[in-house]
Amino acid sequence: MKNLLKKILPEFIFSGYHFCWAFFSAVFYGFPSRELKVIGVTGTDGKTTVVYLIYQMLNNLGYKTAFFSSGFYGINSQIWPNKYERTMPGWHIMQRFLRQSVKASCQYVIIEVASGGIKQHRHRFINFKTAILTNLTPEHIEESHKGSFANYKETKGKLFQAVGPKGSIIVNLDDEQAEYFLSFPAKEKWGYQIESRGQTQNLIRAENCNVNQDGISFRINQIDFKLKFLGKFNIYNALAVVSVGLSEKISLDKIRTSLGKAKPMPGRFEIVIKEPFIVIVDYALTPNALEKVYSNIREIFRGRVIGVLGAAGGGRDKWKRPHLGQVAEKYLDKIILTNEDPYDEDPIVIINAIAQGAKGKPVEKIPDRRKAICYALKSARPGDVVIITGKGGDSWMHFAKGKKVSWDDREIIREELKQLT
């Protein structure tokens, strides 16, 4: 019925419906964000990690802090898995969470802001003090943004518009869309970069960057940072967090100490098994994210790379499926295609679409995700790396007619490896 109504009714009716509910929810809970410093993080990749790192940095420095991300949400020291199956849940849930944060005496709240949430006005009537852009590449184009990257970008821009001239904007200057997001009015504009691509009012640049099996390191203004995170992309994530700290008048030395204590977000480039071979899980869903993960594995490790990947169904970004295959062909020694979240689509159709992009290498097609993981583990030799993407720390697998089953790639890996040893 909902899908039928979307087809026959003008879009502005649904937009007005969502707007009204956002307003009434804010009224019901007394506009709680007015009593908080709210930081919104948007982009295509890295949002969840940046939210979690900002939360840890501020929490470690003694600030009462809450956060809401696609993986988890928390208030001060209590953290719960996000079981709402939305990065940014509906208006009532978000406003209630903000009111709970006020009652817990929180000073800061960090929110992962998805384009789908913005389209449904879930960001409305939240007083964002700061907006952050991690990066921007095509995602949710077909199902949410009428097939247009420009529409996707403009939707993300509404978060920066919501900050207004009294707030702060923080942008990844190495992203090709940085200039657009810096164009919004703000009291302070911050930019972070590794390459020398742009300029802004306040510039944070990482130098002497190094990535290895022990983590990442870099230098800002003669102060050395060392973090136990893998991958160059995590340098960018850390720079976003540093920018937040500096924008809040926290000294660089205190930021360095606090970030040094931070832990990676579960399910994001997480090493699950270290011996006799490496097994990593990651949430990477887009070709850009997948390429970053694979290229960093190639840079850090020396063995063969065996990849298990799929793509979500339900009409989600069908365009990207052959591109995922192209990335897999470029970096993987062994390609295993499997189920991710098929929803109401035939898993074999999805798998075949990915395989079309990997024509240059043989591909194993194993729809059963558990069997695909088991096959990858059986194929691995000492020194190899098995990388399993698409689910990360997700706790459900979604099938047709609303069916879902409990799932955790990390637990499946441990269970299957135990059976093999």
Image (cartoon, rainbow, N blue to C red):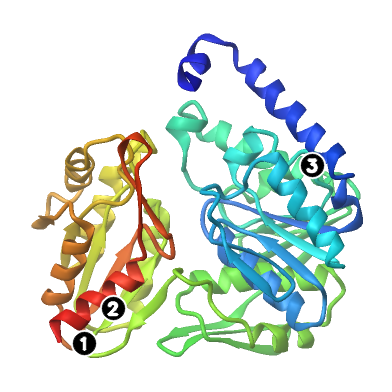
Instruction: Please tell me how crowded label 2 is: few (under 14), some (14-19), or many (20+) other residues with Cα within 10 Å.
Output: few
Horizontal and vertical percent for residue 246?
80, 73
Left or right relative to 324: residue 366: left
Q: Would you place residue 412 above or below residue 315 in this image?
A: below
Write down the residue under mark 3: 162
- Amino acid of disc 1: Gly
Q: Residue at x 57, y 81 (%)?
A: 263
Q: Is residue 130 visible?
A: no
Q: Residue at x 24, y 58 (%)?
A: 328
Q: Would you place residue 293 above or below residue 58 in this image?
A: above
Left or right relative to 352: residue 71: right
Disc 3 secondary structure class: helix
Work out whether mark 1 precedes mark 2 in sequence or the reverse, and give the earlier one: 1
Q: Is residue 268 visible?
A: yes
Write down the residue under mark 2: 414
- Amino acid of disc 3: Ala
Q: Which mark is residue 383?
A: 1
Furthest residue to the top? Answer: 8
CA–CA distance between discs 2 and 3? 44 Å
CA–CA distance between discs 1 and 3? 49 Å
Horizontal and vertical percent for residue 228?
52, 86
Work out whether mark 2 precedes mark 3 in sequence or the reverse, and give the earlier one: 3
Q: Residue at x 78, y 86 (%)?
A: 254
- Amino acid of disc 2: Arg
Q: Residue at x 45, y 90 (%)?
A: 214
Question: Of discs 2 and 3, which sits in the foreground?
Answer: 2
Furthest residue to the left? Answer: 362
Query: Could you say which is closer to the camera, residue 5 or residue 178?
Result: 5
